[in-house]
């Protein structure tokens, strides 16, 4: 028995932030934003909306695809790097909002790779369940509100990020389908490439750190690009090897939508046809942990996946982290 996607869900807030607005904040030219990022607009939360609210919309849509699965859920995993609050976990908050008391629920933080990490954890837990106890379905959600972390004067980052949530319902499928293999890596020696310095035990969130802007998101874009182009092909190759699938046999690649230009560069580095690599970055921007499940859902709506199609889900994130998951659609 394998474990595959039985339901998909996604949600973005209604507030559209276009390039004209980013240009007003930063002084950047709109043409520069499009040329450098390929992003046309992104979505921002409305006042009072929290990360678990976005997750709730996506989770309900995924669960609605198979309502009977609620009684067979074994775990709820939320991937996020912008939790509702430091503790408890956003997973526990989402579990309560869904009315799923007693089901294990927790968070995974691998920044933009978080959904891939959470998916691998869920697959492992469900596989272990075969020799133990517990439900045989999992709800995996990627959700982030990066608008809460943006320095609106920094054109290099505020032009990229938006808010959103995506979810999958993972459950039993016949042998040869579902998750076939995965590979995760982390390189903590590069942790300063993507960070929010203040707010933890190392650097308190106080008046001094706020004045210095250390509570806001920072990224060294050129070095992140170099990391992605070097590491992503490697983890994709290793995930394919673990699944016994050749690169040329993959039907579609669902890549983390860091920005349109980086997705295009990764596509060239992988040596695959761009027609096999869907894009959502132009309309949603970089939604961090939400981008892979959001793109999965959007692509399924546009061109529904056929039974037997082989997919690769892959991306990189702060940490630095990277991952790839190979799936055969059921």
Image (tube, rainbow, N blue to C red):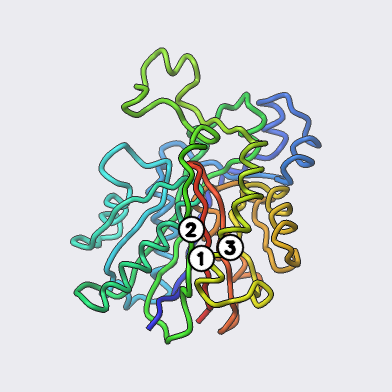
Counting from the top left corner in percent of width and height, residue 82 is at 42, 41
Q: CA distance from mark 2 to mark 3?
A: 22 Å
- Judge depth for marks 2 and 3 and give the one in front: 3
Relative horizontal placement of residue 154, taking residue 102 as reference (left or right): right
Q: What residue sits 30% from the left and 75% below the top?
A: 136
Nearest to N terminus: mark 2 or mark 3: 2
- Judge depth for marks 2 and 1 and give the one in front: 1
* Mark 3 secondary-structure assignment: helix
Q: What residue sits 48% from the left and 58% below the top?
A: 166
Say above or below: 127 vs 175: above
Q: What residue sits 65% from the left and 75% below the top?
A: 251
Counting from the top left corner in percent of width and height, residue 96 is at 25, 54
Q: CA distance from mark 2 to mark 1?
A: 16 Å
Nearest to N terminus: mark 2 or mark 1: 2
Q: Nearer the viewer, residue 245 or 220?
A: 245
Number of numbered tags placed on the structure image: 3
Nearest to N terminus: mark 1 or mark 3: 3
* Mark 1 secondary-structure assignment: strand
Counting from the top left corner in percent of width and height, residue 156 is at 66, 32
Q: Nearer the viewer, residue 114 or 294?
A: 114
Q: For mark 1, does the 10 Å Cα neighbourhood hold few (<14), some (14 to 19), or many (20 or more) residues? A: many
Relative horizontal placement of residue 201, taking residue 238 as reference (left or right): left
- Judge depth for marks 1 and 3 and give the one in front: 3
Relative horizontal placement of residue 24, taking residue 180 as reference (left or right): right
Q: Quadrant of residue 3?
A: bottom left
Label ID, residue 325: 1
Which residue carries the number 3 mark? Answer: 236
Label ID, residue 39: none
Quadrant containing the N terminus is bottom left
């Amino acid at each position: 028995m394998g474990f595959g996607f039985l339901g998909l869900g996604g949600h973005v807030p209604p507030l559209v932030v276009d390039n004209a607005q980013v240009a007003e904040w930063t002084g950047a030219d709109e043409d520069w934003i499009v040329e450098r990022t390929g992003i046309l607009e992104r979505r921002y939360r409305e006042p009072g909306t929290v990360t678990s609210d976005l997750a709730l919309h996506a989770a309900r849509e995924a669960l609605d695809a198979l309502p009977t699965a609620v009684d067979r859920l074994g775990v709820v995993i939320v991937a996020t790097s912008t939790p509702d609050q430091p503790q408890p976990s956003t997973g526990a908050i989402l579990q309560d909002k869904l009315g799923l008391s007693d089901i294990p629920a927790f968070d995974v933080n691998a920044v933009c790779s978080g959904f891939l990490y959470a998916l691998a954890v869920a697959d492992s837990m469900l596989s272990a369940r075969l020799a133990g106890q517990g439900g045989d379905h999992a709800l995996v959600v990627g959700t982030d509100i990066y608008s809460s972390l943006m320095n609106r004067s920094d054109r290099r980052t505020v032009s990229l990020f938006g808010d959103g949530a995506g979810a999958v319902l993972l459950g039993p499928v016949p042998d040869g389908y579902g998750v076939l293999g995965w590979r995760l890596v982390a390189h903590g020696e590069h942790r300063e490439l993507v960070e929010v310095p203040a707010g933890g035990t190392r650097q308190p969130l106080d008046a001094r750190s706020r004045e210095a802007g250390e509570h806001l998101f920072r990224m060294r874009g050129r070095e992140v690009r170099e990391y992605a182009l070097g590491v992503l092909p490697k983890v994709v190759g290793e995930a394919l090897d673990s699944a016994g699938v050749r690169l040329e046999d993959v039907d579609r690649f669902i890549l983390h939508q860091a920005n349109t230009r980086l997705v295009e560069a990764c596509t060239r580095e992988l040596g695959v046809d761009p027609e096999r690599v869907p894009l959502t970055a132009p309309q949603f921007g970089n939604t961090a942990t939400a981008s892979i499940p959001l793109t999965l859902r959007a692509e399924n709506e546009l061109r529904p996946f056929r039974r037997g199609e082989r997919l690769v889900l892959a991306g990189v994130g702060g940490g630095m982290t990277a991952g790839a998951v190979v799936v055969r659609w059921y």
